[in-house]
Amino acid sequence: MVGDGQGLASLVRMRHATVIIGFALAIAACAYKPGSYQYPSREFVGQRTTVGCLDIAVDRRTDMGSAAVLGYTFGNRCDGPTVIDLAWVNVIGRTATGAEVTLVPYDPKGELTVLRLDGRQAGSEAISYPAPESLGQLCVDVASLAHTKPAQWLCFGNPEALAMVTP
């Protein structure tokens, strides 16, 4: 009988180890892979670049009235946490007359703040930037998202304005 009990205990330990290994593999499969711009349920749409530990994609979405909208998708390519700051990212708009306007995110509840994105994780957010008038161009310093220098600007035309001009 002693042999049967030891065999059962061994079988339980093997099964437990198999469950732990399976769980670890499932977690690893969900981890962000550096430079892949892919993460389950997150599509990295727009212009892509790397800043420090962040792989970032930014796209200009349809304006909401005179407010320009940017979509941000980001993945942490490092093993440790990194900073992502959507509250203080530098965004500049240019009007049809060429005037530059410094933009701040629409955040009436003060929810935007500096966040720490865990290693190998990803996230996304869409932010609107109210402007005094419709903007022909929108530029974002993606380096400011990660509190790094030098500036790394990505610029976007207004797809609605282009659609109105195109015959």
Image (cartoon, rainbow, N blue to C red):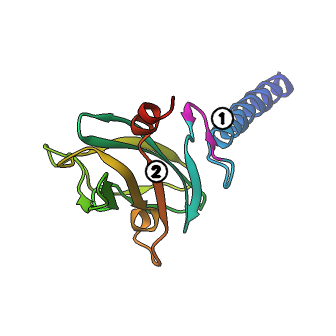
Q: Which secondary structure lies at badge 1?
A: helix
Q: Identify the disc placed on residue 23.
A: 1
123 versus 76 height, above or below: above
* Kind of residue at badge 1: Phe
Could you tell me residue 25's position as x and y percent?
A: 71, 38
User: Which image quadrant is residue 119 in?
Assistant: bottom right
Q: Earlier in the sequence, mark 1 or mark 2?
A: 1
User: Which image quadrant is residue 143 in?
Assistant: bottom left
Q: Residue at x 45, y 48 (%)?
A: 157
> Which residue is labeled 2 in the image?
156
Q: Identify the disc placed on residue 65.
A: none
Could you tell me residue 97's position as x and y percent?
A: 29, 56
Residue 22 lies within the magenta run: no
Q: Which secondary structure lies at badge 2?
A: strand
**Magenta span of residues:** 37-42
Could you tell me residue 55's position as x and y percent?
A: 57, 56
User: Which image quadrant is residue 109 in?
Assistant: top left
* Kind of residue at badge 2: Phe
Name the foreground residue: 35 vs 83. 35
Name the foreground residue: 1 vs 58. 58
